[in-house]
Amino acid sequence: MSIKHKGYDRKSFIILPIVFLIIGFLLIFFVVKPIVAPFLEYADLILLDSEMDYDKEFDDIFVPIVDIEEPLPPDDKEDPDVNAEPPDVNVEPPPTQPDTIPLSSITYPKFGTKYAQIRIPECYISTYLYFGDSTKILKLGAGQSTSSFIPGYGGTILAGAHNNTYFHNFKYIKEGQKIYIDTSYGQYVYTVTETKIIKSSQTKELRLDSDKEILVLYTCYPFDELGLTNKRFVVYADYTSGPIIDHSA
């Protein structure tokens, strides 16, 4: 009996530290990480806040095919009259816009490329769209997740911008409003169907697995909050019009 007991002690001596190590790792991952993550992100913002020549850092392939206004400054229209007529901006598609275009005819953006412009006239939102959503990009405009698709491709287009700059006027968005994405290969229109406030950890709410083309835009919430928050205001919009990209061509 004594030999078996010693053997059991030896196994316990090896197994128990491994079990405690695993439990400790899980505690750190699920308990400590959410607490320190915002501070790490804030430190990252500070470290990356040095001046840069962004024109040299990022490519620009955006050549608008319709006459559009330059993006409004983020604070140019803090409190628009949402009951008034939409601002007088061009929302007409180009007269020669085709129904479909071959994939081979367009330049697919690389990370950091400015390739489009997002406009929501009724909210006085107008900003450039970059492919990629790094800290540097979000200083310049809206950043699109590289895990999502470009307009016309048939999947989810996921993009975000800061709540105190480019997407600050999201607080005026309503169902039924039109969102325009102007690209070098066509103008796309999406209709707002839903808005929702979620936690930053609710990644499934970003709907990257959609089997149809949708536009998902998001920003930090509350809108007037400075610094990092753990909530997101999400706008969902259905594809309404724009050239469909033919993957086989």
Image: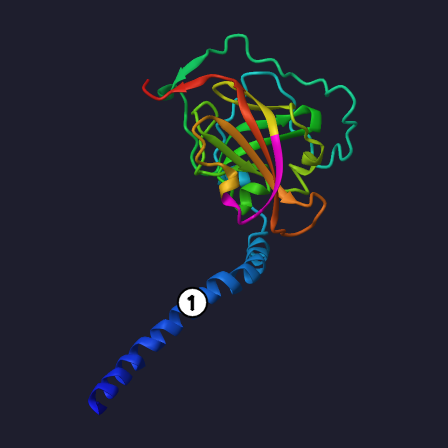
Horizontal and vertical percent for residue 106? 41, 22
The image quarter in which residue 244 lies: top left
Give the camera-side residue of 43 and 231. 231
Screen quadrant of the N terminus: bottom left
Q: Residue furthest top?
A: 95
Horizontal and vertical percent for residue 27? 47, 66
**In this view of the protein, can residue 192 be seen by the observer?**
yes
Total count of labels: 1
Q: Residue furthest bottom?
A: 2
Residue at point 70%, 48% (across, down): 225
The image quarter in which residue 190 lies: top right
Residue at point 46%, 11% (across, down): 98
Screen quadrant of the C terminus: top left
Badge 1: residue crowd in 10 Å (few <14, some 14–19, many ≥20) = few
Residue at point 21%, 86% (across, down): 4
Is the image coloured rainbow, by chain, by secondary structure, or in one colour? rainbow
Range of magenta residues:
194-203
**In this view of the protein, can residue 53 be seen by the observer?**
no
Task: Tell me if residue 196 is in the magenta stretch.
Answer: yes
Horizontally, is 185 left or right of 194 in the view? left
Q: Is residue 89 above or below residue 138?
A: above
Horizontally, is 245 left or right of 190 in the view? left
Residue topped by disc 1: 25
Horizontally, is 98 left or right of 179 in the view? left
Horizontal and vertical percent for residue 53? 55, 42
Circle 1: residue type: Phe
Disc 1 secondary structure class: helix
